[in-house]
Amino acid sequence: MVLAAAGGVGHKELVDLAKQHFSNVPYEYKDDTIPILPRCRFTGSEIRVRDDALPMAHVAIAVEGPGWANPDNIPLLVANAVIGSYDVTFGGGKNQSSKLAAIAAETQICHSFQAFNTCYSDTGLFGFYFVSDGLHIEDTLHFAQGEWMSLCTSVTDSDVKRAKNTLRNSLVAQLDGISEDLRSAFLLHFFKEVDAKIVREVCSKYLYDKCPAVAAVGKLLCPVEQLPDYNRIRSAMYWLRF
């Protein structure tokens, strides 16, 4: 339980009211305890689904991410902002703030893409989703995985500063009341502590030399068949270092 207050509320008054109304709330439920399930196991794998109704290929690649309560989610949110998002309808062309979006706009390797970090109670999915025609699936994966490896090895403070500005703007755009103001202030407080070194360390923990899960949906003979073999995708999850 999280209790938040804003406005002309005294701290002691709030604490006293909380004790009065919530101190007797039980936090253990013996009669209807939810059974503790074994932790799910992430397995690197791939699946290709034929759907002739889709003219484009829809591809997602993800590694195992942290659960909701893990503080690594904050640097990963910043990392996702470094990757950014793209759609052919966006303006800006090759002058996009995201490096990958600039590449996509200039080379037209995909119709759209977005990075995601989906969290569950004890695990998550940190990944990348894109829509492309069959001829450019491999190119899109190549550049996307290259950006992932860059997050692990060479992301700069300038990249992180830009990403945090993007996140701040996004949070401000979502403000819709006092509760959202408090939530945004809470997140922004943690964003301040994230720098390039932290992003590299956290991304190396979840991305570098990890087995991804890959899912692709599209026509059999055009888009999906152009998806590279899983072993090639796996081999792009690390860079040789000298």
Image: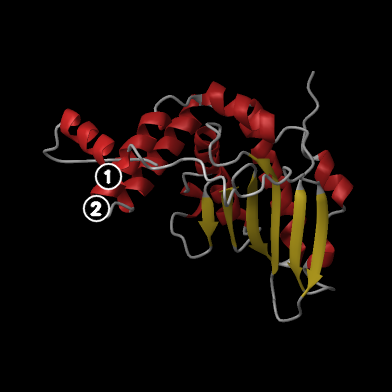
| Disc 2 secondary structure class | loop
Tell me the residue that label 1 is attached to. Answer: 181
Q: Position of residue 17 (x, y in %)?
A: 21, 38
In this view of the protein, which residue sits in the foreground, 61 or 9? Answer: 9
Figure quadrant of the N terminus = top left
Tell me the residue that label 2 is attached to. Answer: 177
Circles 1 and 2: CB atoms closer than 8 Å:
yes
Label 1 Cα crowd, 10 Å radius (few <14 / some 14-19 / many 20+): some
Q: Extreme front residue here?
A: 31
Q: Residue at x 48, y 31 (%)?
A: 160
Q: Quadrant of residue 210?
A: top right
* 45 lies above or below 90: above
In this view of the protein, which residue sits in the foreground, 123 or 65? Answer: 123
| Disc 1 secondary structure class | helix
Q: CA distance from mark 1 to mark 2?
A: 6 Å
Figure quadrant of the C terminus = top right
In this view of the protein, which residue sits in the foreground, 57 or 184? Answer: 184
In this view of the protein, which residue sits in the foreground, 188 or 220? Answer: 188
Q: Position of residue 159 (x, y in %)?
A: 50, 32
